[in-house]
């Protein structure tokens, strides 16, 4: 079993779906059950054995940095400062490499700040294939956008069922024979991903989803379906109202 000690939390986003709250507050500090979303995610990671956390910041960065400085979470917390420009998810990971300070063989968790779940992170880590560049948590929930996986749960592409768009490095991909699964906002990445970013000339600002779709033919990227997953994306005002009950149920 891998010993995963480090994690990155995406907290830099503008939180547009949570307006008007995010007109004066970063999404990561929006409260649920009396505590900011960021508090819930850091504490989940800590309880799963994570010792070092990198948090990227952009929108209301000073407020976020102040919150992190004023609280002791029992883990080492570093700030990846994206105030110069928002780098998107892939660019944010790439920019944080010096703070993560990983060996190539070492893996790390990436977690969206607006995701609450009952995911058993140690089980997730143990289930990941040793050769995986990345393992992404997915589920069968209904949405319009899905990752596409082959029979071995290796990523093969992506589709938007509302528009019919299909993206894949495989020109003759048979979508009907793929498993369509929704992304849950949590990944386990190998430190090798930084070499892959460089080799693929990924740049400074890019979506990690776009990178996965482009690179999945050349790099082993897998999906992981947890047993009895309960998950809530608290990125919208509607779900925010349900989030406290969701946490109590967990």
Image (cartoon, rainbow, N blue to C red):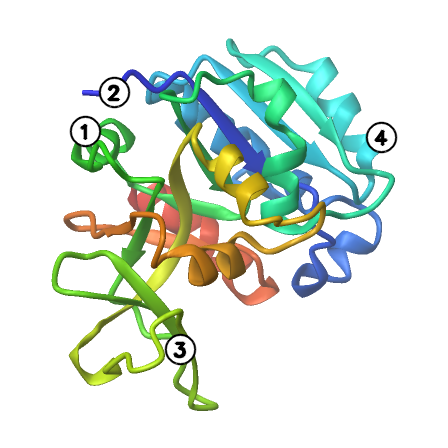
Residue 170 drawn above or below residue 29:
below
User: Which residue, as the protein is rendered here, is positioned at the far bottom?
Assistant: 163
Label 1 close to label 2 by CB (< 8 Å): yes
Q: CA distance from mark 3 to mark 2?
A: 32 Å
Of the two numbered discs 2 and 4 on the same chain, state the one appearing first in sequence: 2
Residue 147's tag is none
Crowdedness near tag 2: few (<14), some (14–19) or many (≥20) residues, C-alpha within 10 Å: some
Question: Relative to 121, is 205 above or below?
Answer: below
State the mark number for residue 159. Answer: 3
Q: Residue furthest front?
A: 199
Residue at which label 4 appears: 62
Q: Earlier in the sequence, mark 1 or mark 2?
A: 2
Image coordinates of residue 60 in percent, x first then y, are: 82, 40
* Distance between the alpha carbons at the discs numbered 1 and 2: 7 Å
The residue closer to the viewer here, 131 or 49, is 131
Using the image, determine if residue 123 lies above or below residue 1: below
State left or right for residue 192 relative to residue 208: left
The numbered dot on residue 126 is: 1
Q: Residue at x 71, y 45 (%)?
A: 204
């Amino acid at each position: 079993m891998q010993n995963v000690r480090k994690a990155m939390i995406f907290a830099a986003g503008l939180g547009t779906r949570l307006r008007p709250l995010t007109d004066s507050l970063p999404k990561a500090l929006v409260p649920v059950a009396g505590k900011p979303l960021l508090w819930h995610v850091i504490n989940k990671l800590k309880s799963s054995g994570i010792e070092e956390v990198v948090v990227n910041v952009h929108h209301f960065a000073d407020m976020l940095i102040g919150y992190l400085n004023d609280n002791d979470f029992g883990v080492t917390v570093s700030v990846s400062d994206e105030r110069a420009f928002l780098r998107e998810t892939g660019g944010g990971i790439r920019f944080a490499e010096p703070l993560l300070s990983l060996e190539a063989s070492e893996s790390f968790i990436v977690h969206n700040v607006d995701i609450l779940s009952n995911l058993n992170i140690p089980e997730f880590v143990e289930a990941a294939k040793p050769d995986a560049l990345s393992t992404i948590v997915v589920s069968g929930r209904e949405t319009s956008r899905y990752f596409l996986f082959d029979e071995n749960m290796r990523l093969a592409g992506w589709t938007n069922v509302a528009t019919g768009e299909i993206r894949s490095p495989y020109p003759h991909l048979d979508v009907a024979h793929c498993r369509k699964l929704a992304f849950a906002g949590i990944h386990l990445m190998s430190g090798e991903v930084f070499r892959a970013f460089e080799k693929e000339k990924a740049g400074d600002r890019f979506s990690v989803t776009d990178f996965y779709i482009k690179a999945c033919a050349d790099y082993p990227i897998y999906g992981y379906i947890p047993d009895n997953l309960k998950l809530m994306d608290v990125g919208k005002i509607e779900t925010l109202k349900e989030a406290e009950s969701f946490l109590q149920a967990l």
